[in-house]
Amino acid sequence: MNCLHILSLLALLLVPLATLRAAGASPPNILILYADDMGFGDLGANNRASKIPTPNLDKLAAQGLRFTDAHSSSGICTPSRYALLTGRHHWRDFHGIDTGFDAPVFKAGQLTLPEMLRKNRYATACIGKWHLGWQWDSIRKPGSPPQSKRHDAFDWTKPFRGGPLDHGFDHYFGDNVINFPPYTWIENDRVLAVPDITFKTTPKNTKEGSWECREGPGRSDWDFYAVLPTLTRKGVEYIRSRKGRTEPFFLYFPLPSPHAPIVPADAFDGKSKAGAYGDYVVQTDDACGQLLQALRDTGAETNTIVFFSADNGAEQYAYTRDEKHGHWSSGPLRGLKRDLYESGHRVPTILKWPAVTKPGSTTGALFSQIDLIATFAAALGVELPRAAAADSHNFLPLLRGETDQGPRTTHVHNTNPDHYAIRHGDWLLVDAQEGYVSRRVPAWEKRHGYPDDDHAPVELYDLKTDLAQKHNVAAAHPEKVAELQALLKRIRDQGHSAPRLAPSPK
């Protein structure tokens, strides 16, 4: 290839994708692989001491850009998914999870990432865990008690609204949530097989931990161990079905794993040195690998953005896993799922954009999953409505290598109401007496060299020198505590934090 050809290719990378589309070039496909309850330190590329092999995701990191300071909006499932798909911090609207039969969490007319992409001629699909609510009352039988979750309280022959198809997706396949009813496959807006029992017990044992499954409608022949393999097969089929199509696709693939119940297929038993959870992470990596292989097989790999991340940190079983197997799912970080400490929301994150992101590169830029919608909008040359994506930042210049500084300097962390932490630069303020939301385990803290709780009203950490969050320096920096508390209040009160919504300088 001569210099003129090289310069021509570089020029193409610097123009908006909307311009390329007008010239006949195809915008990139987008594949989001979204793990469930996977710790920062479970990914081999993040943690050389990990006892869990993740070869497919490690290869993805070697081919793309790995974020070391990337965050979900919440320490639990539903809020993080909402924030990713809307570009809006969940805590502006709600805090808890969809409990299985709740209404949709989206507001009427709210723009989502798939809606934005569909308006720009993308085919859009969600295959996997939804967990964002449906309009279940639309199929509730007349006279059935409003709160009943019995299988015979619903007319399962009818379609139900409020799910993925009403929020930007052309196609959905999944079981909503692996440990919540209804325990049956859903395709688009109806079940494929009518629930015939009210689920109360499970036919098999888990391989680690408890089932954590809620009571409700299900199929008597439902097999939890078949959920991940079935979703993986459907994801591969979708990618293969796009071969030869002219329109780009967006596939949002929210995995059910390695969330409880811990149900790795028998073929993965013993594949890690971190127990059954580790084996389930191996299977999760394998599922991602199968979708990535489908991209290669169909020739779509060279024109597909792949984004991998997780909704929050690992579940509480990680304490036992650390003691028994010497594997700490959070790597160098403190905390787990739900916690305000870093590993409640700092999650493994990789973005590969062929010919745009530098292979094998790493960034320490502060990044949030809520930044995806503004970044993809900028890539497509789309102007977001002022009411949309209130907290989303555009990372396109960083992805292109035009700068090594990200646009985000601040991020707010939250799981429960009135229990916040705020990150600004290298400083992290836990605006509460402690950052634990799940529980404190003194034996773990002692084993890892943490001091006794000082019972101070807030905690302040300098992550540049104390990534493990061992040393509360709030008493030594009262002015920094006051500064961050004021900043947190301003961001909460003003209703947005996206740079494009900031007032124009006079």
Image: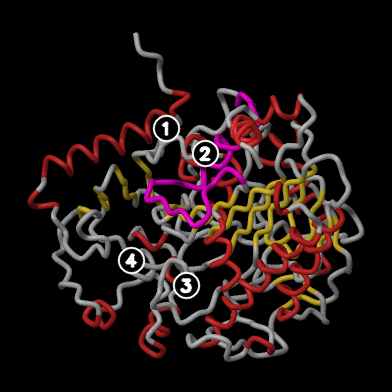
Specify whether residue 359 is painted magenta.
Answer: yes
Q: CA distance from mark 2 to mark 3?
A: 28 Å
Residue lying furthest front in this view? Answer: 2
Give the CA separation, mark 3 to mark 4: 12 Å
Q: What residue did someone put label 1 on?
A: 497
Q: Are marks 3 and 4 in contact (CB under 8 Å)?
A: no
Secondary structure at numbered mark 3: helix
Q: What is the crowding at mark 2: few (fewer than 14 residues within 10 Å), some, or many (at least 20)?
A: some
Residue 226 image-quadrant placement: bottom right
Mark identifier at residue 400: 2
2 or 1: tag closer to the N-terminus: 2
Mark 1 / mark 3, whichever is N-terminal: 3
Earlier-in-chain disc, 2 versus 3? 3
Q: Residue furthest top?
A: 506
Q: CA distance from mark 2 to mark 1?
A: 23 Å
At label 1, the amino acid type is Ser
Q: Secondary structure at mark 1?
A: loop
- Give the mark nearest the N terminus, 2 or 4: 4
- In the rendered structure, the answer to whether residue 179 lies left or right of residue 314 reads right
Residue kind at label 3, given as amino acid type: Asp
Going from N to C along the chain, the mark reached first, 3 or 4, is 3
Kindly check if marks 1 and 4 are in contact, taking CB atoms under 8 A apart as contact: no
Q: Residue 448, position in %: x, y?
A: 24, 78
Kind of element beneath mark 4:
loop
Disc number lying in front (2 or 4)? 2
The disc placed on residue 333 is 4
Q: Is residue 424 rendered to the left or right of residue 88? A: left
Res 42 label: 3
> Could you tell me residue 350's position as x and y percent?
53, 56
SS for dot 2: loop
